[in-house]
Each structure stands twice: as structure tokens, then as C-alpha cells.
Image: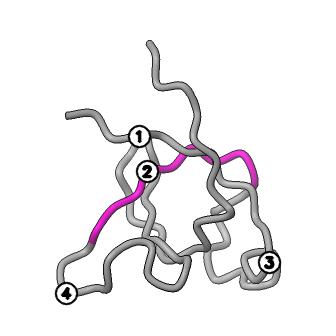
């Protein structure tokens, strides 16, 4: 099953919380669920990884993610 791809555009605290230096606006990401962590959506947050490499990025606000068409 293909994971849904999102585009990251920082809003709210994601603008000021720059722990993820390589995460810039326009980065294509996927939601991931690390073992032992709260479910995605808890308090409006979710865990993400790079869409192309699968490299884990961290925790961001769900409002910073916009779904894109997954064709092709």
C-alpha cells in the first residue's frame, strides 16, 4: 500500500521550532508511526519522514501538512 504524500509548509510553532534544520517549506513527506509513540493526530501533531528516502524527521503540527495528488 502506498503512503499518502504531503507537502510541508510550516505554521504555528513549526515556524519557530527549527530542530529539523533540513525541513524546509515545500519538502515532500509521509506520515509515519514510530513504535511506542502516541498515535498521529494526538493534540494535532504527527510524526513524519522524507517521502523519497524514508528518513525520519520528527514531530510536526498536522496543520503544516497539505496532501498532494499521489499520481505517477
Classify mark 2: helix, strand or loop.
strand
Dot 2 corresponds to which residue? 30
Image spot of residue 49 (x, y percent) = 42, 58
Query: Tag on residue 12?
Result: 3
Q: Secondary structure at mark 3?
A: loop
Answer whether labels 2 and 4 touch (C-beta < 8 Å).
no
Mark 4 and mark 1: Cα distance apart in space: 22 Å
Q: Position of residue 33 (x, y in %)?
A: 28, 68
Task: Answer few, some or many: residues within 10 Å of disc 2's Cα (few below 14, many 20 plus, some between 14 and 19).
Answer: many
Which numbered circle lies on residue 4?
1
Counting residues from the N terminus, which is met first, the one under dot 3 or under dot 1?
1
Q: Earlier in the sequence, mark 3 or mark 4?
A: 3
> Disc 1 versus disc 2: distance between alpha carbons?
6 Å
Q: How many marks?
A: 4
Spatial separation of the CA atoms under disc 3 and disc 1: 23 Å
On the image, the x and y values in percent for residue 4 come to 41, 40
Quick check: marks 1 and 2 in contact, CB under 8 Å?
yes
Q: Determine whether, in the image, residue 54 is placed left or right of residue 7.
A: left
Q: Quadrant of the C terminus?
A: top left
With 38 as the anchor, is 22 left or right in this view? right
- Callout in the foreground (1, 2): 1
Magenta segment: does it hold 30?
yes
**Badge 1: how crowded within 10 Å, few (<14), some, or many (20+)?**
few
* First-in-chain label (4 vs 1): 1
| Among numbered discs 2 and 4, the one appearing first in the sequence | 2
- Disc 4: which residue: 36
* Whole-percent x, y for residue 61 in the image: 61, 73
Amino acid at each position: 500500500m502506498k503512503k499518502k504524500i504531503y507537502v510541508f509548509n510550516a505554521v504555528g510553532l513549526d515556524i519557530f521550532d527549527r530542530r529539523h534544520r533540513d525541513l524546509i517549506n515545500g519538502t515532500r513527506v509521509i506520515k509515519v508511526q514510530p513504535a511506542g509513540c502516541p498515535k498521529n493526530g494526538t493534540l494535532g501533531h504527527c510524526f513524519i519522514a522524507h517521502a523519497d528516502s524514508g528518513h525520519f524527521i520528527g514531530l510536526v503540527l498536522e496543520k503544516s501538512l497539505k496532501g498532494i495528488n499521489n499520481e505517477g
